[in-house]
């Protein structure tokens, strides 16, 4: 029973985390035509009812093949892309909308309203390496305002693999590409590729060293650097479906999507498993929000002091000398982009499981980009890992900022003894406290 209760608690945590967030879900046609698909749809319906915004992109490749063959239309491919002729387009549309309708019907059975729309502007892929791709197109623009309205109304938008030019010409577009672009444009929390091949199996590819491999032999997780290395190692093998998806997932994560998951749609509950546990069963590509954070080295102190100087002058930070900084060097972390330090912050450890977040400064040129937030989140995570239970901060001007990061107003008497003795009454800094949940 205790286990079940813990499980429910864990699920509540995840529900809370994802409420109001957008998940973009691309489903291969082989999964849509699989007997398990109605169960997957039910899971998606549950997610939608929990307040997650669902965007669906059904793949239609095999259905298009079927319909074209049925009508005796042949086609050619180049660079793994179908060359859609203008004559084939009405049949391709028929197949794409047929698949979208199938999903619509299943959602209706589950009492969920959905809409199929023409929100994608496309243009021809044109001529590439001498090959004319005719009516095969690429995404040019997405009507984001309309999609946001649809999502705000609690509807599920369904995107067939068709886009239209500004003059109304239909083009056959790639559902995978569309999913990656949509996830980026909507700043989705997650992008899913629900496939038949599952995730990325180590035995089928060349893989970078030190990658986590699951019991099933899958690459469990790749950060952006690892995903990039993976693609480089396998360059030239592009006919393997996994590579296209990893490349698109990487692009989406670089554009601000937190996580992209490549999962096997034939596994019952795969999407729930991926969302509600730390142990997903596919391959995850993730952007590490702490990627730009590193420890401070003694050689960094002059640049860090320069960054802090304007805040010393305004009385926002207590002045520190080079010696002070060197003495506390190990406590500081820096936020660095391309060799330039944009921000800094420290975690000082005090007795009895207490910690102090201090010296948080973000260069004005880079203010309002969430850098301060990331530095504090990183320091809190570090404190948690060190087993600290209570973190405090002293500030004259940034108390509201700390409050919105989850700190609470505190009092001098709550500070550790040594800090209390050193408290400067004339400076009268506010005290902010962060207690880790039990
Ligand atoms: C406070 C500070 C670290 C914020 O850095 P940042 O990277 O710009 O912060 P984020 O981007 O994470 O958060 C910005 C949000 O917090 C708000 N914010 C920033 N400074 C604030 C302050 N002093 N009080 C209240 N809110 C503040 C902004 O309005 C902003 O909201 P917006 O993006 O919707 O406009 C930075 O302004 C700074 O270096 N201040 C001087 C030093 C200082 O006071 N340090 C804290 C004491 S240790």
Image: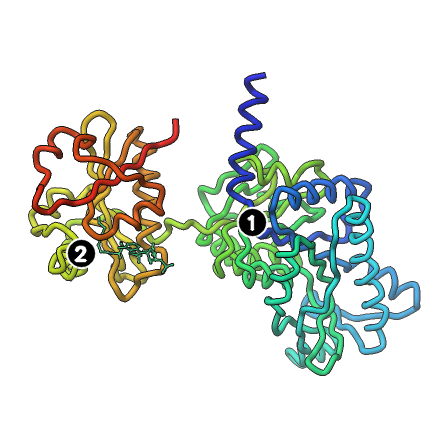
- Does 20 appear above or below 410? below
Q: Can you tell me whether the CB of the residue at mark 2 lies under 8 Å from the nearest atom of ligand 1? A: no
Which residue, given by chain and number where applicable, does mark 2 sit on?
A: 304
Q: Nearer the viewer, residue 173 or 362?
A: 362
- Where disc 2 sits, the SS reads helix
Judged from the image, the quadrant occupied by ligand 1 is bottom left
Q: Which mark is residue 20?
A: 1
Residue at 72% x, 47% y is 196
Q: Residues within 10 Å of mark 2 (few under 14, many from 20)?
A: many
**How many labels sit on residues?**
2
Of badges 2 and 1, the one in the foreground is 1
Q: Position of residue 292 (x, y in %)?
A: 34, 54
Image mark for residue 389: none
- Which residue reaches farthest right? 71
Please state if 11 lies on the left or on the right of 29 as rendered.
Answer: left
- x, y percentage for residue 207? 52, 48
Residue at (17% x, 35% y) in the render = 412
Colour scheme of the picture: rainbow
- Considering the numbered disc 1 on the image, is that residue within a helix, a strand or a loop? loop
């Amino acid at each position: 029973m205790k286990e079940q209760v813990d499980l429910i608690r864990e699920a509540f945590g995840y529900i809370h985390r994802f409420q109001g967030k957008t998940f973009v879900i691309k489903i291969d046609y082989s999964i849509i035509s699989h007997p398990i698909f109605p169960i997957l749809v039910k899971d998606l319906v549950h997610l939608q009812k929990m307040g997650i915004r669902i965007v669906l992109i059904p793949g239609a490749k095999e259905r298009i093949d079927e319909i074209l063959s049925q009508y005796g239309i042949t086609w050619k491919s180049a660079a793994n892309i179908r060359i859609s002729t203008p004559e084939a387009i009405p049949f391709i549309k028929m197949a794409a909308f047929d698949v979208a309708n199938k999903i619509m019907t299943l959602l209706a059975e589950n009492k969920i309203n959905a809409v199929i729309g023409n929100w994608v502007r496309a243009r021809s892929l044109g001529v590439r390496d001498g090959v004319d791709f005719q009516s095969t197109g690429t995404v040019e623009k997405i009507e984001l305002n309309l999609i946001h309205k649809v999502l705000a109304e609690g509807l599920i938008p369904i995107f067939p693999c068709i886009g239209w030019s500004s003059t109304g010409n239909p083009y056959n577009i790639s559902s995978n590409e569309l999913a990656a672009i949509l996830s980026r444009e909507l700043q989705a929390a997650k992008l899913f590729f629900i496939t038949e091949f599952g995730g990325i199996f180590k035995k089928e590819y060349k893989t970078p060293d030190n990658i986590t491999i699951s019991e099933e032999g899958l690459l469990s997780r790749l950060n952006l650097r690892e995903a990039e290395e993976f693609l480089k190692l396998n360059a030239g093998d592009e006919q393997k479906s996994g590579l296209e998806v990893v490349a698109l997932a990487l692009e989406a994560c670089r554009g601000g999507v937190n996580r992209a998951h490549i999962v096997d749609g034939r596994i019952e509950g795969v999407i729930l498993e991926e969302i509600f546990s730390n142990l997903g069963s596919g391959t995850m590509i993730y952007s590490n929000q702490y990627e730009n954070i590193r420890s401070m080295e003694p050689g960094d102190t002059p640049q860090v002091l320069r960054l802090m100087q304007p805040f010393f002058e305004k009385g926002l930070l207590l002045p520190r000398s080079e010696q002070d900084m060197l003495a506390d060097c190990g406590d500081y972390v820096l936020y660095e982009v391309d060799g330039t330090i944009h921000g800094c912050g420290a975690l000082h450890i005090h007795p009895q499981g207490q910690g102090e977040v201090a010296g948080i400064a973000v260069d004005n040129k880079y203010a309002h980009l969430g850098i301060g937030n990331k530095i504090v989140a990183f320091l809190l995570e570090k404190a948690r890992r060190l087993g600290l239970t209570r973190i405090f901060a002293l500030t004259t001007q940034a108390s509201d900022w700390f409050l919105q990061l989850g700190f609470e107003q505190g009092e001098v008497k709550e500070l550790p003894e040594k800090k209390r003795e050193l408290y400067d009454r004339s400076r009268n800094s506010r005290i902010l406290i962060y207690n880790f949940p039990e």
